Image: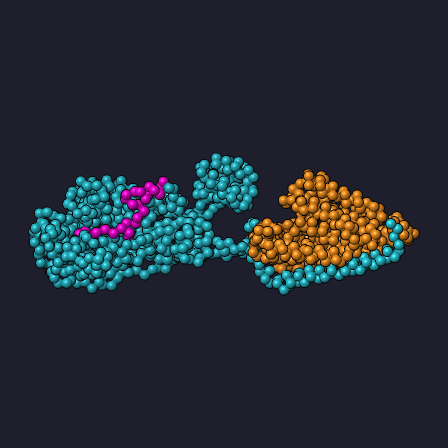
Amino acid sequence: MKRTTKDSEFSSRKISRRGLIMGGAQLAFVGALGLRMRYLQVDQADQFRMLAEENRINVRLLPPARGLMFDRNGALLAANEQNYKIVLVREDAGDVEEVLARLAQLVPLTEEDLERATREIYRRSPFVPVTVADRLRWEDISAVAVNAPALPGVTPEVGLSRGYPRGQDFAHVVGYVGPVSDYDLERLNDPDPLLQIPKFQIGKSGVEAKLEHELRGKAGHRRIEVNATGRVMRELDRIDGEPGANIQLSVDADLQNFIQARLAGESAAASVIDTETGDLLAIASSPSFDPNKFVRGISVADYSELTENKYRPLAGKAVQGTYPPGSTFKMVTALAALHDGVVSPEDTVYCPGYTYLGGRRFHCWKRGGHGNVNLHDSLMRSCDVYYYELAQRVGIEKISAMARLLGLGERHDLPMSAVAQGLAPTKDWKRERHGEGWQVGDTLNAAIGQGFVLASPLQLSIMAARLATGRSVTPRLVKSINGVEQPSHAGDSLGLNENLLRQVRRAMFDVSNSRRGTAFRSRIVEDAFRMAGKTGTSQVRSAVVRNQDVPWEQRDHALFVCFAPFDAPKIAVSVVVEHGGGGSKAAAPVARDIVLQALYGGLPPLAAYPAADHERIREMQRELPLRNPSSAEDGKDQA
Amino acid sequence: MSYLEYNLKTAPTGLSKIFHLNWPVILLLTAVSCVGFLMLFSVAGGSLTPWVEPQMKRFGLGMVLMFLVAMVPIWFWRNMAGVAYLGSLALLLLVELFGAVGMGAQRWIDLGFMRLQPSELTKFTLVMILAAYYDWLDVKKTSRPFWVIIPILLILVPTYLVLRQPDLGTAILLVAGGGIIMFLAGVSWYYFAGVVASGVGAITAVFKLRGTEWQFLKDYQYRRIDTFLDPSSDPLGAGYHITQSKIALGSGGWTGRGFMQGTQSRLNFLPEKHTDFIFTTLAEEFGFVGGISLLTLYTLIIFFCVISALRNKDRFSSLLTLGIAATFFLFFAVNMSMVMGLAPVVGVPLPLVSYGGSAMLVILVAFGLVQSAHVHRPR
């Protein structure tokens, strides 16, 4: 093994040579690394710096406060209530189960709540706050705050959530909000980033939905620095959004409350319109529901109770419901015929209780007949045969045109859900819709507001207002947005003959003020507030049977339209009581109470009522489930 | 024996050896370690804990060990090469049997005061045994097949054990480091040409046969290769490391965001920010200038080692110094390539900068050997 010097020198030369090769290769590699570094850090620096900013900075939206809603007198209809909730951060809590168990002793938490919260807590990252309890009372929050040392990771928080202090009074008008759904996103096609916030509350029905854009406001945002797991490191800057617009509605909350209370127990609707401005003072539908339940997330039991109720509480019948207007339509037929000159107010028609047309017998509601009736008598006593005769003379097209002129068969532009168009039928419409020609019998039915004619309570109140003023009164629901008064529609003249109108109004006056009028029992005796109206009873079935003898669903709808005071009309009212029986019995008394309530601006004195009614009215006034005016202001009992 | 040829009279003795140490290398090692302390301090958000303090202690311990190793004559270490190699193999086996599982791989033995990673040790004991082997082997036999097979086996046994852990990074370093020593020792070019040719052939075959019944790798392994070649194909999965690390590097620019101002690494976008990916913090906070500076420090260490080796007439010392320098080079070259997206993510630390006890100690001890070779060189 002895190595010669030559070997050793040979080997060390070899090592030297290969060592230099290796060193050179290493140097080349280092050079490559340096170039790569230059490429990444210098040549592409801008691009990577931008990517880094994206990595680091996260923009979080700050939801704006939703606009409030008030009635015409400033009473709060839709509020943003302080919502006390409890959030829990897993990594701070330590033993989550133990902390939750302690928490359950302090605040009302059901097993279900706890289970849901626990699931959520473990699903999220440990530092994400999870809402454990929502909508707590101040006392609960205080209890949690006092026991804070025993509840690590638990923090009480205050947020805003929508509340409706007036409860069910405005459920159909104001509507309600709810968390945005996939369906909403598709439907709205709105790029507003706010909608991307999970569970962001948007209007689901009523004004809340129709004026969503105004109410929502503009999102603010804050830029925060986050790490790779999404933990917030610090806030970089913050730009507050614009709160939504406050909206003042034309409605009178107290009047609405009175009407809802008055209609309680019935499936009914009423509409009150200011004849001078077109302001809707009340637009009520009964039964109603508590919109606050929808905001909180309604239980399945509560919801099915609402959907299965045969009185249909979810439907806003005042604008969505359409009914055959019955005899309340007779003013339309009368005016159409009078204007056409086919009849004069003094002309009489003999009513034997029926008429024949093409072998078919058309009844008057009064079997015995009314004898000879002119315009005044026919309206006051609601003779059908008179209108059968007029209808044959004037024809359906002119009746329909008059109906539309008075606001029927037309969709009025109100920010409420599913505003119905109703129907003022024409020959073309029937051919298109049913593929059949128009029969004269159809005209006869239409003349007394039966058959194809359909109108909503809203439209009927507009009709009454237009009859009262001769102007095209158009309803207004939104009085002002953020203090900016919205245009009102007192309307131009309808171009109707004032003399003829006066005749019709006079007849309507006698409906409730003449002993022979159909609504005489619902008259107002206070001279300043006398009302003029028209009863209506629209048939749901064809056979003539006494209403008491048939099931509720088959009874007639009771209707009443009116305006008051007669001498200088201020308001027009329509009342529809579904399956209520006769208009004079079921609808007219309600309309009278509404008129008096509206004109007096509160519960009317008994002196306004006929003496015979005093006892009954006093009883009714005492028992009305009216909202306590003092609690109406803060609305805490509802929230 | 070759040490008989040393001119012992001129070799320094006693404490005077200190003056003959390769001081530039020591200073450079200290400088690099200080860069490491700074970066660990920054990554910890301006705190000495949890990383800087233990790292400094290990550096102190490693320096002491380095001086002790340097004081001992190089021929003693050459005689110990076999023992060291077998010892590290035994430790690798021990890990295999009793090792703790960290990050999905069995890598260390818990000694109580520190966790020992035998694979780190093996990188340098392999260099020692190969240097000793070629020192012992007659130069004329170097390229004979039988005498080539032996060092290949010496390399493959620990490589196999390391792969079992599994630790691909170390395995690559072992094979490459061992190969470099064989190359330095003068094994014929033909062998290397053969290895390269068969390697290219194998890679071609692997890709050509993909999707056929005879494919070599499992589908997920192909996907990993895809991810390396195009990190953006899987930005949140396996490509996440590479993409994020490139972003951090690139956002540093010329001069960086400034010390402690790095956002990417400090905000946890980077995985392993205190170990394998610590270079990204440096590059983000000190930019191109900082990165090139560190690269220069590393290159200078290699440079001084190569100079020392080339001027050393002792074959073992020469091979050992070059081998250790080459292994050290592989460390930072692979790590930086990985961080800069030039190589797949294989888990190789940045030497002396990355947090990690075993690597720090082992590297300093290895440079102790380099010092010993330098001090005790024949004159």
The stretch in magenta equals A301-328
Q: Is residue A126 left or right of residue A66?
A: right
Quadrant of residue B99 within the rendered picture = top right
Label the orange chain with its letter: B
Residue B300 shows in the view:
no
Q: Nearer the viewer, residue A555 or A618?
A: A555
The count of marks equals: 0
Q: Position of residue B146 (x, y in %)?
A: 77, 50
Q: Residue at x 85, y 48 (%)?
A: B75
Q: Is residue A412 left or right of residue A373?
A: right
Q: Residue at x 46, y 52 (%)?
A: A197
Q: Residue at x 47, y 39 (%)?
A: A115
Q: Is residue B18 left or right of residue A156?
A: right
B304 w.r.t. B117: above or below: below
Q: Nearer the viewer, residue B146 or A560?
A: B146
B73 w.r.t. A411: above or below: above
Q: Nearer the viewer, residue B298 or A329?
A: B298
- The answer to whether residue A312 is magenta is yes
Write down the colour of chain A.
Answer: cyan
Q: Position of residue B331 (x, y in %)?
A: 71, 53
Q: Position of residue A135 (x, y in %)?
A: 43, 43
